[in-house]
Amino acid sequence: MTHSNTVLRVDGLTKQFGDTTALSDVSLSVGTGEIVVLLGLSGSGKSTLLRHINGLEEPTAGAVEVLGQAVPQLSGRKLRELRGRIGFIFQQFELVGPLSVLENVLSGSLGTLRGPRLGLFSYPRDYKRRALEKLERVGLLDRAYQRADTLSGGQQQRVAIARALMQNPEVLLADEPVASLDPESSTQVMSLIREIAADDGLTVVCSLHQVDLAISWADRIVGLRHGELVLDMPAAGLSKAEVMEIYGRVATSTAELSAVENELRGARGLDMAELVS
């Protein structure tokens, strides 16, 4: 698949929190309709990078450009307008449990409405129709009036996807969207994200730590370690063993190698001796 126009560009991005460097001179670009997986262990900088793309963090150095706009230079209304074009899916779903599934989906449209909303009756009829369409798309139309906190984890994440779609986004960010799910639900959610991206021409940047899922669903894999970019290549033809070997070469301690094995296990039976050889 060819991805022409650049939707996202990061150039020399560095972020420091006190004495801790969360991102160090990271550069990448993402094209229209591309599905990019940020792959790395906990603390590698994946979430911090996503937060910069959405304007939730300001860089210490470097540039972030999304949909032709320099994100760090935006504030107020202009930043809100850009965020309205960027959907965000969270690891813990971030639903309001006591509210109905439908009202949770409707909350994705609050950026386009004036004033607070108190209950389903306060949303325009057209918005409710659109929300029901999004629920049908993720296979949960029959759960529209059920409390969100009565759903399974996989169902809650599908509600979160429907909520993000209410924004009609051009870019979809997903921060470890399947980390809290069982393998079957993880596959269903990633399949749904890819299907929606293909149908809508969405650009997707998704953080994961599961190599198998990354290779299966991504167009491209970007690997991060301790805030540095250590891998950037097409997923097609890339094996889990190759990814493991790259992480093994840049690991700096026995503890880190153990973490690589634990989180990225199963690549053709690799052991620590192979990783450091």
Image: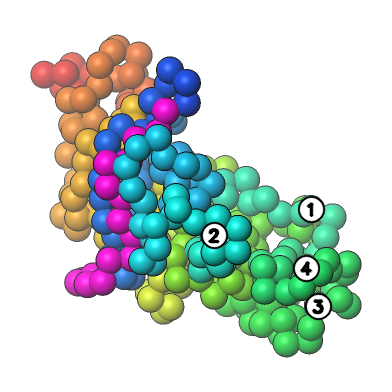
Please say if the residues under marks 4 and 2 sit with CB atoms less than 8 Å apart.
Answer: no
Q: Which residue bears the numbered disc 4?
A: 103
Tag 3 secondary structure? loop
Q: Residues within 10 Å of mark 2 (few under 14, many from 20)?
A: some
Q: Which of 197 and 181 is in front in this view?
A: 197
Query: From where the camera sits, is residue 156 visible?
Result: yes
Q: What residue type is labelled 2?
A: Leu
Distance, label 4 to label 2, CA atoms, is 25 Å
Of labels 4 and 2, earlier in sequence is 2
Q: Which residue is drawn at 44% across and 65% down?
A: 171
Distance, label 1 to label 3, CA atoms, is 19 Å
Left or right: 4 in relation to 120: left
Q: Which residue is drawn at 88% across and 77% down?
A: 121
Q: Which residue is drawn at 75% across and 81% down?
A: 128
Q: Which residue bears the numbered disc 1?
A: 97
Q: What residue type is labelled 4?
A: Glu
Q: Which residue bears the numbered disc 2?
A: 79
- The label nearer to you, 1 versus 3, is 3
Quadrant of residue 95 within the rendered picture: bottom right
Of labels 2 and 1, earlier in sequence is 2
- The label nearer to you, 2 versus 1, is 2
Q: What residue type is labelled 3?
A: Tyr
7 falls in the magenta region: yes
Give the magenta part as a residue range. 1-16
Classify the position of the N terminus by image quarter.
bottom left
Q: Which of 268 and 112 is in front in this view?
A: 112
Q: Residue 46, relative to residue 103: is it above or below?
A: above
Query: From where the camera sits, is residue 105 visible?
Result: no
Q: Which residue is drawn at 67% across and 68% down?
A: 111
- The label nearer to you, 2 versus 3, is 2
Of labels 4 and 1, earlier in sequence is 1
